[in-house]
Amino acid sequence: MTTYRLPEQARAALLTRKIPADRPLDAWPQDDPEQPTDVLAAVRSRITREVQDIQGWTVVDTGLDDLVDDDLCSAVWNLFTTLCRPVPQYRTGELIYPVEVSGAPSLASSHYSSSNRTGGFHTDGTLLDAAPHVAMLAGLSSADEGGETVLVDAHRLVDTMDERTPELLSVLEAPQPFHSGDSTDDPVMLHPVISRSGPHLEVHYLRRYIEQGHGIQGQRMDEKLIDALETWDELIAEPAFQQPVLLERGQVLLWDNRRFVHGRTPFTERLSRRRLRRAYGVFRAA
């Protein structure tokens, strides 16, 4: 795994704006930093190209791991808003969100985000009107053991299914109901698991949401759909398709949320907790 370390001038530019520690999660600034520089423009161009056109994901080492948490979160946010226009993660409007084990997740939040469950490969934002193009995780601390974020390129999954079981791949291209299961008042979102338009691919996936979507509509899942989801999950579980990424403090992982599903490995917290900050966005024009 290669890591892009920010130039010193870029690191300095990211410290020009500080977000107060008590700023509500839905009120973080959505504009880019007030003092854009040529070096930040070059950083944006490089990272955008890596995620949009080349590998589909990248790890950025900010070199700011010695900052206190609030200052590091501000710098990471300034980097993210240099690259992207943030979009809310939930219908309650949060723009930045803590991903760490919590004893009492709210119904408005993802239970997965605040738990130590593993696996659960998915794309983010399947219950939003439009899923985010870019997802970001920023490291504040890692667990004593494990806790890697695992990326799986859906292009490789689709190519493999197209070769082995094309009849099941076509099942995943039909719209499926997605539902969180939290409240019957929540809307059911309809997405195909896989959308292909020429060379472009867009994935929406969280199996539990599909199962709950059928349940809330009073439908039984078709056997062919179950077979297709089982095949999809079996491919995701193959180590050859997985890219694990362990985020250290001050490192930022960005990936194309339309192209990759992701999950995480088991982790053990004794002296150190796995603490990340998450954001969704759309790349700004270069």
Image: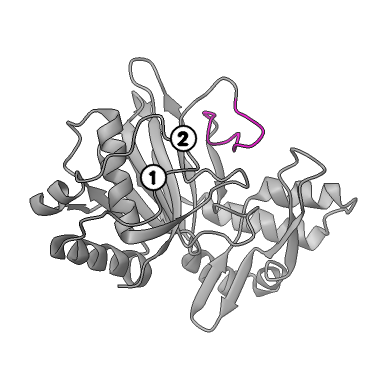
Q: Amino acid at mark 1?
A: Leu
Mark earlier in primary sequence (2, 1): 2
Residue 239: percent from the left, percent from the top?
A: 44, 50
The residue shown at (49%, 26%) is: 101
Q: Is residue 153 shown left or right of residue 177?
A: left
* Residue 121 at least partly seen: yes
Q: Which mark is residue 99?
A: 2
In the image, residue 211 above or below residue 24: below
Q: Which mark is residue 137?
A: 1
Q: Is residue 74 shown left or right of residue 237?
A: left
Residue 166: percent from the left, percent from the top?
A: 65, 74
In the image, residue 84 above or below residue 95: below
Q: Amino acid at mark 2?
A: Val
The residue shown at (58%, 68%) is: 161
Dominant SS in magenta: loop
In this view, which residue lies farthest toward the top? 271
* Residue 265 at least partly seen: no
Q: Which mark is residue 163?
A: none
Residue 228 falls within the magenta-colored stretch: no
Q: Secondary structure at mark 1?
A: strand
The residue shown at (37%, 67%) is: 284
In the image, residue 114 above or below residue 46: above
Which span is picked out in magenta? 105-116
The residue shown at (52%, 64%) is: 157
